[in-house]
Amino acid sequence: MEVEERPVTRDFRIRDGKLPQWEVPGRLYFITASTHESFTQNLTREDLAGAVCSCIEHDDAIRYSLRAYVVMPNHVHVLLLPMLRDGGFVPLSEILQSLKGASAHKVNALLGRSGPVWLRDTHTRAVRSERERKSKWRYIMRNPVRAGLCVGSEDWPWLWPRPEQ
């Protein structure tokens, strides 16, 4: 099934899929991308996590301004602000396609496999306030600790920005 993108106004878009995605220009986004049910590898395997991190960081200052991210065993969380381009903002759909496509390609190459790495739909949330921004940033920083993967955020290698040690 093709994802249809319908312009609602010049700057406001709704993407159809299983999860609707609302795009609001100039907003910071909290994004969660989860692995496909057929993908049984742990994303925190060092080579896979490194590939995912490099893909997230690659488009920083090109398509978006990266604020924070964490790679977990079966999902990633990213906090980013789409960049200005051609009198508007880089569409979230383009950002997600680039990030998920490039990382899936790298991960599959490392594993010598083909097939989906990510679920088609991605949970996105436009951050509406400074309080919510701080909450989402803390959520990303604390996610590996809450999941029992490390004692302190500074111990988790696939977290950016690196917490003060």
Image: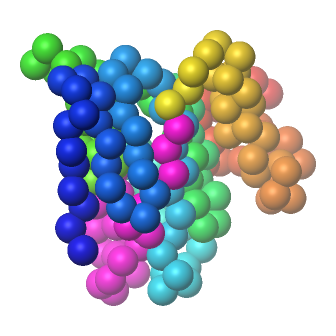
Q: Nearer the viewer, residue 129 or 152?
A: 129
Which quadrant would the N terminus be assigned to in this image?
bottom left
Instruction: Indicate the position of residue 155 as horizontal and vertical percent values.
Output: 77, 45
Apparent side of residue 23 relative to residue 38 in the rendered image (left or right) = left
Residue 58 visible in the snapshot? no
Instruction: Indicate the position of residue 143 as horizontal and vertical percent values.
Output: 75, 47
- Which quadrant would residue 85 be assigned to in this image? top left
Q: Nearer the viewer, residue 77 or 150?
A: 77
Q: Nearer the viewer, residue 115 or 28?
A: 28
Instruction: Indicate the position of residue 89 as horizontal and vertical percent values.
Output: 24, 23
- Which residues are drawn in magenta? 98-125
Q: Is residue 110 magenta?
A: yes
Apparent side of residue 38 relative to residue 54 in the rendered image (left or right) = right
Residue at the extreme front: 8
At x 89%, y 48%, the residue is 151
Placement of 68 over or under 149, stated as above or below: above
